[in-house]
Image (cartoon, rainbow, N blue to C red):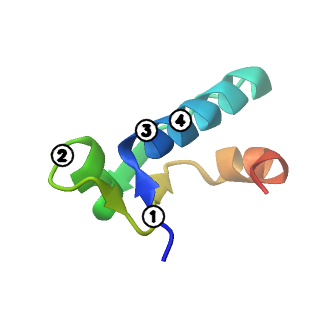
């Protein structure tokens, strides 16, 4: 099963940030579960998925076409 490393998670979050800046919107993310353990606590080297909550529905709708 494929996993996401610390570097890949960070790069994905940075990409999302760049897309938000280009769209002129501010986003807030909440990392949860495995991604949080990998990035913040360094409890393991990778995770099977990246769970994140984007704290604005409008933000998600505006960025969705670029994320897919």
- Spatial distance from mark 1 to mark 2, Cα to Cα? 15 Å
Q: Assess disc 2: are there few (<14), some (14-19) or many (≥20) residues with their C-alpha within 10 Å of its C-alpha.
A: few
- Spatial distance from mark 3 to mark 1, Cα to Cα? 11 Å
Res. 2 in view: yes
Q: Which residue is mark 4?
A: 11
Q: Earlier in the sequence, mark 2 or mark 3?
A: 3
The image position of residue 34, as x and y in percent, is 30, 62
The residue lying at 29 percent from left, 43 percent from top is 39
Against 36, residue 15 (above or below) is: above
User: As rendered, which of 9 and 33 lies closer to the eye?
Assistant: 9
Against 42, residue 16 (above or below) is: above
Q: Which residue is mark 3?
A: 7
Q: Earlier in the sequence, mark 1 or mark 2?
A: 1
Looking at the rendered structure, the secondary structure element under dot 4 is helix
Q: Assess disc 3: are there few (<14), some (14-19) or many (≥20) residues with their C-alpha within 10 Å of its C-alpha.
A: few
Looking at the rendered structure, the secondary structure element under dot 2 is loop
User: As rendered, which of 26 and 40 lies closer to the eye?
Assistant: 40
The reply to whether the C-beta atoms of the residues labelled 2 and 4 are less than 8 Å apart is no
The residue lying at 43 percent from left, 38 percent from top is 7
Q: Which marked residue is nearer to the observer: mark 1 or mark 2?
A: 1
User: As rendered, which of 23 and 19 lies closer to the eye?
Assistant: 19
The reply to whether the C-beta atoms of the residues labelled 4 and 3 are less than 8 Å apart is yes
Q: Which residue is mark 2?
A: 42
- Drawn side of residue 46 relative to residue 13, left or right: left
Q: Which residue is mark 1?
A: 3
- Spatial distance from mark 2 to mark 3, Cα to Cα? 12 Å
The image position of residue 59, as x and y in percent, is 67, 44
User: As rendered, which of 6 and 59 lies closer to the eye?
Assistant: 6
Outermost residue on the bottom side: it is: 1
- Drawn side of residue 2 relative to residue 6, left or right: right
- Spatial distance from mark 2 to mark 4, Cα to Cα? 16 Å
């Amino acid at each position: 099963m494929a996993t996401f490393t610390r570097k890949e998670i960070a790069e994905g979050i940075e990409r999302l940030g760049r897309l938000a800046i280009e769209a002129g919107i501010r986003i807030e993310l909440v990392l949860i579960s495995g991604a949080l353990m990998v990035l913040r606590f360094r409890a393991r080297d990778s995770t099977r998925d990246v769970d994140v909550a984007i704290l604005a529905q409008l933000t998600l709708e505006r960025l969705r076409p670029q994320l897919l």
